[in-house]
């Protein structure tokens, strides 16, 4: 049952829309929101865009790009770690015939809407790429405590900062994924 698969407040995927084609009819349930998943758009040969919805975000959606290769594929950015985002990615990747065991990931930067799903999509054979500055942030991450202490020292109310961090989508829908970092010369 669709309702059982939903996270609280999430939308159900009830239709797929192919860009340029007419939309179909939708059945509504009083307890579900309608969520359309747009099928991948071919940008050019072997380069596709998957529009990933970002529920409850002013950004509305993220463009994930897929480069389909002969031996390996590359996914660029993944969306929040939410069921709605995961469904959109899985639907798009499936429509493209992408085998995740032959797929690598490039994360443009460490915001939850860009890397939130990488830990759920990557396999043991996936390589995950991101920038050196982001690697340095991960290697030296001490949590939010230093930022909270710094803000408090300069007059920002600690309780307001804690509330802001708690409610931030990056904190709520980020990934538990922590990469094993390796250095390449």
Image (spheres, rainbow, N blue to C red):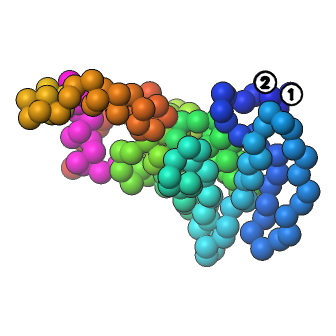
Q: Is residue 83 magenta?
A: no
Q: SS for tag 2? A: helix
**Residues tagged 2 and 1 counted as in contact (Cβ below 8 A):** yes
Q: Which residues are magenta?
A: 129-145
Pointer 1 local density, CA inside 10 Å: few below 14, some 14–19, many at least 20: few
Label 2: which residue?
4
Pointer 2 local density, CA inside 10 Å: few below 14, some 14–19, many at least 20: few
Label 1: which residue?
1
- Cα gap from disc 2 to disc 1, whole angstroms: 6 Å
Numbered label attached to residue 125:
none
Q: Residue at x 75, y 42 (%)?
A: 33
Q: Residue at x 24, y 48 (%)?
A: 132
Residue 29 coordinates in the image, percent (x, y): 86, 38
Q: Picture quarter containing residue 174? A: top left
Residue 101 visible, this angle: no
Q: Picture quarter containing residue 85? A: top right
Residue 99 coordinates in the image, percent (x, y): 66, 46
Q: Residue at x 61, y 75 (%)?
A: 44
68 to the left or right of 148: right
Residue 185 coordinates in the image, percent (x, y): 21, 49
Residue 42 coordinates in the image, percent (x, y): 66, 70
52 to the left or right of 143: right
Q: Is residue 132 magenta?
A: yes
Q: Residue at x 23, y 39 (%)?
A: 137
Q: Picture quarter containing residue 178? A: top left
In this view, 183 is above or below 71: above
């Amino acid at each position: 049952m669709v309702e059982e698969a939903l996270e609280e407040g999430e939308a159900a995927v009830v239709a797929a829309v192919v860009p340029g084609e007419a939309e179909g009819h939708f059945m509504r349930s009083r307890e579900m929101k309608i969520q359309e998943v747009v099928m991948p758009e071919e940008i050019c040969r072997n380069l596709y865009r998957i529009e990933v919805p970002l529920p409850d975000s002013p950004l509305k959606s993220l463009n994930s790009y897929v480069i389909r290769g002969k031996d390996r594929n590359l996914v660029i950015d993944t969306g929040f770690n939410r069921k709605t985002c995961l469904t959109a990615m899985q639907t798009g990747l499936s429509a493209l015939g992408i085998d995740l065991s032959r797929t690598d990931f490039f994360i443009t930067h460490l915001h939850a809407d860009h890397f939130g799903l990488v830990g759920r999509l990557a396999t043991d054979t996936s390589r995950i790429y991101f920038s050196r500055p982001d690697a340095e942030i991960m290697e030296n991450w001490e949590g939010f405590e230093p930022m909270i202490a710094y803000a408090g020292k300069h007059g920002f109310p600690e309780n307001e900062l804690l509330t802001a961090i708690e409610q931030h989508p990056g904190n709520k829908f980020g990934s538990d994924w922590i990469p094993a970092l390796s250095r390449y010369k």
